[in-house]
Image (cartoon, rainbow, N blue to C red):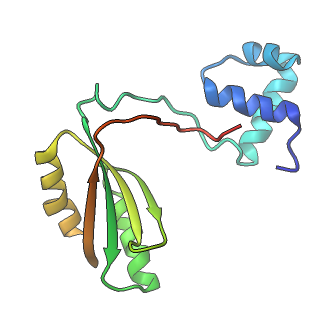
């Protein structure tokens, strides 16, 4: 963060709000010409402040109506087993987020599925195929109150 000035922070904020914004529009928001804005954005990308760009899709409109948080406990805790779990779970399309957590569980997965039948199939056939899972605890989302994807400014 020490390398970022107020202009860089504003560029990041604006890109986070709308990554589809043109360089010309972005330049107008920070009172610079397009060329230095373009160079600053490329530098922010190169330095890893911007990890990528994507479109935010409506999961419900895509037929994925059920959000489940699934907490996983591993049977054993070794480097190889942990690494294999991470590799396996990252390959599962229904898992949109995975966190290594502290407390009673080892990992928290955010899972998007069509419905309860799809989730049942996911637990039995997908999670069931991942080795070394000791237990899985599911929490079903009743309604989304606030959902954010960005970094707070």
Rendered image quadrant of residue 89: bottom left
Q: Quadrant of the C terminus?
A: top right
On the image, the x and y values in percent for residue 3 come to 88, 47
- The relative height of residue 102 versus residue 33 in the rendered view (above or below) is below
Q: Position of residue 108 (x, y in %)?
A: 39, 61
Q: Measured from the top left, where is residue 68 in percent x and y?
A: 29, 49
Question: Quick check: 64 left or right of 35?
Answer: left
In the rendered image, the vertical position of residue 99 relative to residue 146, given as above or below:
below
Task: State left or right for residue 97 relative to residue 40.
Answer: left
**In this picture, residue 21 sits left or right of residue 62:** right
Give the number of marks.
Answer: 0
Residue at screen point 53% across, 38% down: 149
Asked if residue 90 can be seen in this view, the reply is: no
- From the viewer's perspective, tell me whether residue 31 is left or right of residue 44: right
- On the image, which quarter does residue 16 sit in? top right
Is residue 57 among the parts visible in the rendering? yes
Q: Position of residue 140 (x, y in %)?
A: 26, 49
- Who is closer to the viewer here, 47 or 7? 7
* Residue name at image x 43 percent, y 86 percent: 78
Q: Nearer the viewer, residue 142 or 35?
A: 142
């Amino acid at each position: 963060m020490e390398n970022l000035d107020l202009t860089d922070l504003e560029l990041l904020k604006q890109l986070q709000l709308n990554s589809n914004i043109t360089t010309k529009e972005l330049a107008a928001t920070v009172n610079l010409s397009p060329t230095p804005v373009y160079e600053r954005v490329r530098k922010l990308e190169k330095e890893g402040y911007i990890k990528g760009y994507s479109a935010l899709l409506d999961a419900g409109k895509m037929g994925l109506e059920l959000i489940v948080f699934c907490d996983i406990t591993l049977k054993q805790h070794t480097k190889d087993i942990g690494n294999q779990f991470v590799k396996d779970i990252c390959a599962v399309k229904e898992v949109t987020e995975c966190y290594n957590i502290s407390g009673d569980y080892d990992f928290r997965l955010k899972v998007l599925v069509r419905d309860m039948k799809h989730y049942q199939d996911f637990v039995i056939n997908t999670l069931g195929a991942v080795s070394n899972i000791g237990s899985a605890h599911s929490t079903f989302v009743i309604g989304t109150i606030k959902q954010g994807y960005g970094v707070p400014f």
